[in-house]
Amino acid sequence: MELPHSPACDRNKEVIAAALKEWVTEDMKSFLEVGFGTGQHAYHFAPLFPHLTYHAADQESYHPILNLRMNTIEKPSNLEGPFLFYGNQEKDEIEHNLPLESYDLIFSANTLHIMSWHEGLLTLGKMASLLDSGGVLLLYGPFTFEGNFTSDSNALFDQSLKGRDPRMGIRPYEKVREKLQSHGLDEKKILTMPANNNILAFQKT
Ligand SMILES: C[S@@+](CC[C@H](N)C(=O)[O-])C[C@H]1O[C@@H](n2cnc3c(N)ncnc32)[C@H](O)[C@@H]1O
């Protein structure tokens, strides 16, 4: 099996890393990535924060990808996984085997528009409940704001997602915020990123 590679991860890893550095503090100990995909982000970010234990989680079908990466390229010493995190719409629950009950920082990139909104709500709720008091949640990807796409290309991307699967689609920032606020998270910042993406930063109070 060839090591899966995402050109987008190569393009965005430096700017996301710079944003992460704004939020990672010396007293944090644990970092959870939900939906690691190819594992490229985990391999780039984990060594930047050696004082953190970096847990990489995704649905089970992606685990061979991270295992292959770990068998091919020496893994960062603080990177652990793959762990299971799966928003199961049929069972109406998140299935997971995360070893910690709470995390200081949770990061997820390009996940909410790929899963159904029902799975998205499950995922947001679980990420909120897995955050330690004072912990930070960072969501990277495309979002709409007040019903508007941030670019024509994002509107086309939304159409192509819905063509692939009508349950997919770019999510409204306001709905994400509403769900997270109902779980005790406060909006801290909306960062504008290259390629019409954003990072939404929330904190558990
Ligand atoms: C487009 S990939 C993004 C991967 C990586 N974070 C990146 O930025 O390249 C979408 C990710 O969402 C995950 N995902 C999709 N549906 C999911 C679900 N129901 N529960 C958990 N993860 C899901 C996929 O397994 C995949 O890792």
Image (tube, rainbow, N blue to C red):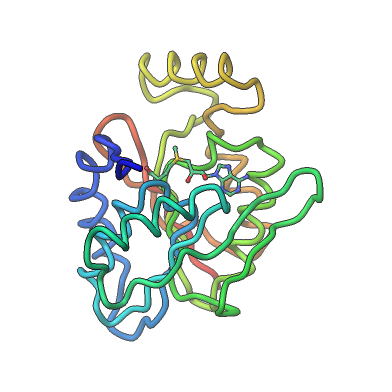
Q: Is residue 197 above or below residue 127?
A: above
In the displayed orientation, state which residue is furthest to the bottom: 27
Position above or below: 31 against 108: below
The residue lying furthest to the right in this view is: 91
The picture places residue 168, in percent across and down from the top left corner, at: 59, 28
Q: Position of residue 125 (x, y in %)?
A: 66, 57
Query: Which of 199 and 187 lies nearest the eye of the viewer?
Result: 199
Q: Quadrant of the N terminus?
A: top left
Q: Position of residue 24 (x, y in %)?
A: 31, 71
Q: Dividing the image into 4 quarters, which one contains the C terminus? A: bottom right
Task: Return the residue nearer the eye: 172 or 61.
Answer: 61
131 on left or right of 70 = right
| Residue 96 place in picture, x, y as percent | 64, 64
The relative height of residue 116 versus residue 161 in the rendered view (above or below) is below
Give the number of callouts: 0
Residue drawn where x is 28% and y is 82% of the image: 51
Image-quadrant location for residue 164: top right
Most foreground residue, 36 or 145? 36
Q: Quadrant of residue 69?
A: bottom left
Tell me if residue 200 comes above or below residue 131 in the rendering: above
| Residue drawn at point x = 30 percent, y = 53 percent | 41
Q: Residue at x 53, y 61 (%)?
A: 186
Going by the image, does 44 lie left or right of 102? Answer: left
**Location of residue 183 (image quadrant):** bottom right
Q: Residue at x 75, y 44 (%)?
A: 89
